[in-house]
């Protein structure tokens, strides 16, 4: 029998410990490298943080698998067993440029089912956390079920990338939505954008390209408060590949899918 409370307690204490280390790093000079392109950044602190989690997890739970963004975990080809999906710093560009608006994101899955989600906004000391079937919390406060909202009253998270020329979607599709909603935002940390929807601070998040570590924790939180999570074709997200992502409050998801995305046939 898996002791999820024990796993949850360890995960939370490690996340806090990692957060303290990240804060200490503000006094050091960062070693910044690029990955897939000149704006895809990684620092020595991203790498150290991932390695910190891997060391802790392997010592306490040697039979658990780890999928980490920076590649220090296991070579994951299936989600059989228990898998930790880790983004050590989500929002690395913000971490480098702003020293805020970034988060540690950890989703823990059992046979592909999300069991625990943790998103830690280090600078605000806000830990968003959820266990499947036990509700979602922001620090000690339980988050309320999400209420329906109309398109014209919605504040949505959408990066300008997707309303200018890009190689994923015709910009006119989402610029029409951007025109109709009350407002748009872009935080630059997918994990924080998802956590913001779970906390009712934002109504939807739309993006054309996210990796499993960007959304693994957020999905667990959102499921607890009734958020709807699919790709832009209305299908469930795949935790082993990149995905487009449409997350929204109930009702709003349906409207965006129907009125703007032609039920996924755009
Ligand atoms: C990125 C952030 C960003 C999103 C990118 C992600 P990283 O993660 O979540 O908001 O737009 O797609 O790759 O690289 O900072 O961990
Ligand atoms: Ca990320
Ligand atoms: Ca990252």
Image (cartoon, helix red, strand yellow):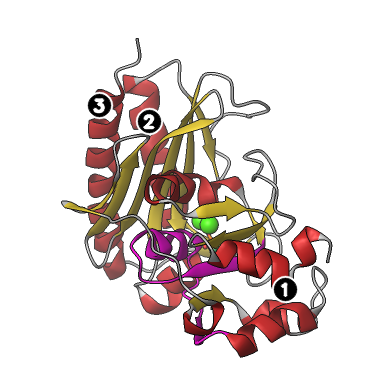
Q: Which residue is mark 2?
A: 55
In the figure, is residue 32 to the left or right of 119? Answer: right
Neighbour tally class for label 1: few under 14, some 14-19, many 20 plus, Cα within 10 Å: some
Comparing marks 1 and 3, which lies closer to the viewer?
A: 1
In terms of secondary structure, where does tag 2 sit? helix
Residue 5 numbered tag: 3
In the figure, is residue 180 to the left or right of 137? Answer: right
Neighbour tally class for label 2: few under 14, some 14-19, many 20 plus, Cα within 10 Å: few
Residue occupying the point 22% across, 33% down: 9
Q: Is residue 204 visible?
A: yes
Q: Quadrant of residue 175?
A: bottom right
Residue 63 position (above or below residue 203): above
Q: Nearer the viewer, residue 46 or 188?
A: 188
Residue 153 position (above or below residue 132): below
Q: Which percent across, then down, holds residue 42?
A: 54, 60
Q: Which residue is mark 1?
A: 260
Q: Is residue 41 visible?
A: no
Inter-mark Cα distance, 1 to 3: 42 Å
In the figure, is residue 1 to the left or right of 177? Answer: left
Mark 3 / mark 2, whichever is N-terminal = 3
Mark 1 / mark 2, whichever is N-terminal = 2
- Tell me which segment is drawn in magenta: 181-208
Inter-mark Cα distance, 1 to 2: 45 Å
Q: Nearer the viewer, residue 117 or 11?
A: 117
Q: Which percent across, then down, holds residue 124?
A: 24, 67
> Ligand 2 within 8 A of label 3's CB?
no
In terms of secondary structure, where does tag 3 sit? helix
Q: Quadrant of residue 262?
A: bottom right
Q: Is residue 112 magenta?
A: no
Residue occupying the point 83% across, 61% down: 265
């Amino acid at each position: 029998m898996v002791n999820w409370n024990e796993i949850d307690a360890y995960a939370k204490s490690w996340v806090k410990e990692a957060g303290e280390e990240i804060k200490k790093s503000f006094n050091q000079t960062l070693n910044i490298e690029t990955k897939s392109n000149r704006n895809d950044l990684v620092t020595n602190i991203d790498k150290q943080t991932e390695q910190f989690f891997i060391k802790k997890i392997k010592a306490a739970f040697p039979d658990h698998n780890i999928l980490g963004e920076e590649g220090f975990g296991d070579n994951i080809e299936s989600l059989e067993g228990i898998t930790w999906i880790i983004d050590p710093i989500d929002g690395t560009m913000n971490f480098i440029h702003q020293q805020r608006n970034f988060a540690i994101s950890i989703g823990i899955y059992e046979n592909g089912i999300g069991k625990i989600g943790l998103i830690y906004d280090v600078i605000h000391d806000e830990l968003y956390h959820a266990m499947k079937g036990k509700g979602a919390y922001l620090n000690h406060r339980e988050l309320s079920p999400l209420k329906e909202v109309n398109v014209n009253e919605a504040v949505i998270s959408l990066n300008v990338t997707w309303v200018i020329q890009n190689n994923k979607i015709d910009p006119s599709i989402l610029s029409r939505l951007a025109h109709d909603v009350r407002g748009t935002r872009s935080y630059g940390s997918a994990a924080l954008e998802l956590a913001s929807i779970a906390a009712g601070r934002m109504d939807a998040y739309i993006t054309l390209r996210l990796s499993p570590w960007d959304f693994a924790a957020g999905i667990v939180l959102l499921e607890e408060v009734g958020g709807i999570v699919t790709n832009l074709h209305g299908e469930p997200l795949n935790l082993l590949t990149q995905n487009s992502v449409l997350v929204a409050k109930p009702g709003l998801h349906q409207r965006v899918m129907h009125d703007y995305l032609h039920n996924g046939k755009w």
